[in-house]
Amino acid sequence: MTTFAAAADASTEILAAIRALQAHDLPTRGGHTLAYVYDSGVPGLDELAAAAYASAMHANALDPTAFPSLPAMEGDLVATAASLLGGGPETVGTVTAGGTESCMLAVAAARDARGDIEHPRMVIASSAHAAFHKAAHYFGVAIDMVDVNPVTLRADAGAMAAAIGPDTVLVVASAPSYAHGVIDPIPEIAAAAATRGVRCHVDACIGGWILGSWRRFGIRPGNREVPPFDLSVPGVTSLSVDLHKYAYTPKGASVLLHANAELRAAQYFVHTNWPGYAMLNTTLQSTRSGGPIAAAWAVAKRLGDKGYRDIAERTADAVTRIRAGIADISGLRVLAEPDATLIALAATDDGPNVFAIADEMAARGYYIQPQFAFRGAPATLHITITAANAGNETELVGALADSAAAAAAQPEPSFPPEVVETVMAADLSTPEQLAAAAGPLGLLGEGGALALPARMAPINALLDALPSVVREQVLRGVLSMLTRPGTDLLAR
Ligand SMILES: *Cc1c(COP(=O)(O)O)cnc(C)c1O
């Protein structure tokens, strides 16, 4: 009896300890965190997802014959995504752990289907998600990056067509792009790829579910039609759509669709030439938790057409209202007219520093994501609008207006020139050197651990000014410092 009671107490304490650690996290619910998280605002949905997740979290999709419930649920999710996104009777797909994995698998399949090409390449717009650079890095596929149209920020279909060469195994387009929220001219890009016999992947990781819902239910924010973007477009051979974004499922679920099974074949990894089990992998993972699959299945089933229609309508209203509200804020402008639910905000010519606005928003309880200047596009603030933003658009727009005004009253964020010189001159390749550079930047807390200041604008402005190679080296070091071992959980 006592042991049982002690164990129960321990669990309560442990959960309280987790909550204490989470006190410094951004809120995942309530629409104040405008990147990273998705909130449907539907009561009871999280509880259902948690129960479904728990019921399957120890099941392993590594062996579909051992846990047939998982391929059954996976098949339903793929069929649902295919029906929303222009799939036909031949369409097949896979549930992956996330958008990056879906994009990486599309690249891997395209490369491996063309074993005859010694040095494979892919054509992507400069607005393509970093996941494709990651795929290029891991899989040895060279990138031909084509600048977007400088005004619309959409991919330049003509320039992409011209970049296709004999070694091109894949052409990539976005619906929409993460950074700027615009949809590429997919019919033109896919047609150019098809003409050359090359695969065309549509990265609809973030936009697929909401755009498909808008189209299915005749929702037209800003009175605009959703442009053709999915598998129904001739020449599109694969498409990725994340469930853990606008399908509002717990993290760890995305779908990669292929137009037919032949196109998918090279995605699989099957190995039997070792003394263990036959390793049959559809994704990069091998052991694959059933948790995200069951949770996604439960959420999709519970929301259904009616639930997703409701959410899609509310989200469209929120985007329209927030877009209209921003137009009245002095010093801010939308970088491109949003085609979906993402807004990139830039400063007007005489407007305040955007990184200072992000700090001011943080002080008002909102997280908005800073984005660095890139190839002619200025630094921006990224806003991902979800259903949870519906009904409180005025507060959000008000906070943005106040933040812009407060930022405008401040001096341009910067460090004294001698600090910048010291940091720039340092060789940042070891943790010690990095720690030495972090001091003058005000990034060291108690005991020499990395501690981020409340105001990040000077740091962001400094990073923004660095060439990306140097910036990446600095951030690599910061990442290493942030993930230092702390308490040994087994010590007692
Ligand atoms: C989010 C996103 C990805 C990557 O998805 P993760 O789930 O974060 O790995 C890829 N492409 C686009 C357009 C995205 O928005």
Image (cartoon, rainbow, N blue to C red):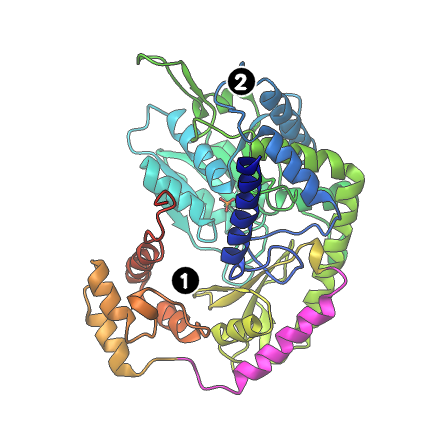
Q: For residue 235, say whether it is visible.
A: no
- Indicate the position of residue 492 as horizontal and vertical percent values: 37, 45
- The span shown in magenta is 390-413
The answer to whether the residue labelled 2 contacts the one labelled 1, judged by CB atoms less than 8 Å apart, is no
Q: Secondary structure at mark 2?
A: loop
Numbered label attached to residue 64: 2
Q: Amino acid at mark 2?
A: Pro
Q: Secondary structure at mark 1?
A: loop
Q: Nearer the viewer, residue 149 or 103?
A: 103
Q: Nearer the viewer, residue 205 or 22?
A: 22
Within 10 Å of the Cα at label 2, are there few (<14), some (14-19), or many (20+) other Cα atoms? few
Q: Nearer the viewer, residue 366 or 449?
A: 449
Numbered label attached to residue 375: 1
264 w.r.t. 346: above or below: above
363 w.r.t. 392: above or below: below
- Indicate the position of residue 411 as horizontal and vertical percent values: 45, 86
Q: Residue at x 49, y 18 (%)?
A: 63
Mark 2 / mark 1, whichever is N-terminal: 2
Q: Is residue 276 magenta?
A: no
Which quarter of the figure has residue 480? Answer: bottom left
Q: Amino acid at mark 1?
A: Arg
Q: Is residue 401 magenta?
A: yes
Q: Quadrant of the N terminus?
A: top right
